Amino acid sequence: MPTGFATNGVCSPESVNGNRDACSCKDSDSLSADHLVIMVHGILGSSSDWKFGAEQFVKRLPDKVFVHCSEHNMSERTLDGVDIMGERLAKEVSTNFIMSLRLFKKSQIYAKISFVAHSVGGLVARYAIGRLYRPPKEEVKEDTSGNGCKEEAEGTIGGLEAMNFITVATPHLGSRGNKQVPFLFGVTAFEKAAKHCKAYDNDQDEAEDNGSHDKLEEELVRGLSRVSWEKIDVSFHRSKQRIAAHSVIQVKDQVLHIEGADVIRHMIDKFLT
């Protein structure tokens, strides 16, 4: 692994692909971390947008997480549509980590995976998760008497145990009132992302799309209600940077947007490891 840079006990090594990732500078902590955290930026963003968040995760959970900031959909590539960006993210995660688990840390194998995303990155991550999801398979195990019994394993994200899906300022139900979703991504792309918010089912054909926004919204709500989730409302009305609240909540700039640091801390406090 090429030499990277370190700050406050957090190493940001440069991988063979040129990516920047965050892990503990202590070898013992880094090698024990088996939880892969994928951070996804928003529209017209870059992998550096999550730099502060990535470093905070590693500082607070040094022996548990290895953070990768996605970089395959940066800048103008965020205008390509949710489905195209989702395919890129799925390929990025699969190629760099799932298919090559020892790429960054040769003695490390990841067992868990989480996604943390900002803005449209949440829609992209949802699409990618749908592509990487693998349904549970029945396993036959012998009991103490030697008899076989079937146990149904949990579904996985590319073979890794799914832990957290955290999004900030993501329009999961769209922004139809301002016509932002059709303008930026196209209705078709957004509907494709919606279909991937629910578990992949090999035995169920995709429902035909009738172009109804109301039915799409109902499907999104049903999909989100199938798993336990928590919504946290955050207000920056009293912030000096309230006009930039969309960036403050992510702490895109550590100096200008530091008022959003509490949001990052709350994420980590609630993070399942």
Image (cartoon, rainbow, N blue to C red):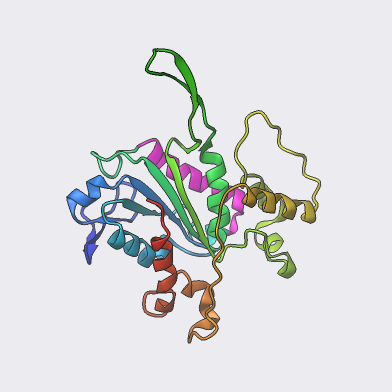
Q: Which residues are magenta?
A: 79-100
In the rendered view, tell whether residue 15 sits above or below residue 173: above
Residue 90 in view here? yes
Task: Write the residue at 39% across / 35% down.
Answer: 99
Mark count: 0
Residue 134 percent coordinates (x, y): 52, 34
In the rendered view, tell whether residue 158 sits above or below residue 5: above
In the rendered view, tell whether residue 130 sits above or below residue 149: below
Q: Residue furthest top?
A: 146
2 drawn magenta? no
Q: Quadrant of residue 266?
A: bottom left
Residue 252 in view here? no
Task: Write the residue at 39% across / 67% down.
Answer: 265
Residue 231 percent coordinates (x, y): 56, 63
Q: Main secondary structure of the magenta part?
A: helix
Task: Write the residue at 67% across / 59% down.
Answer: 173
Task: Write the residue at 32% across / 51% down.
Answer: 66
In the rendered view, tell whether residue 246 sits above or below residue 62: below
Left or right of residue 173, residue 235 in this image: left
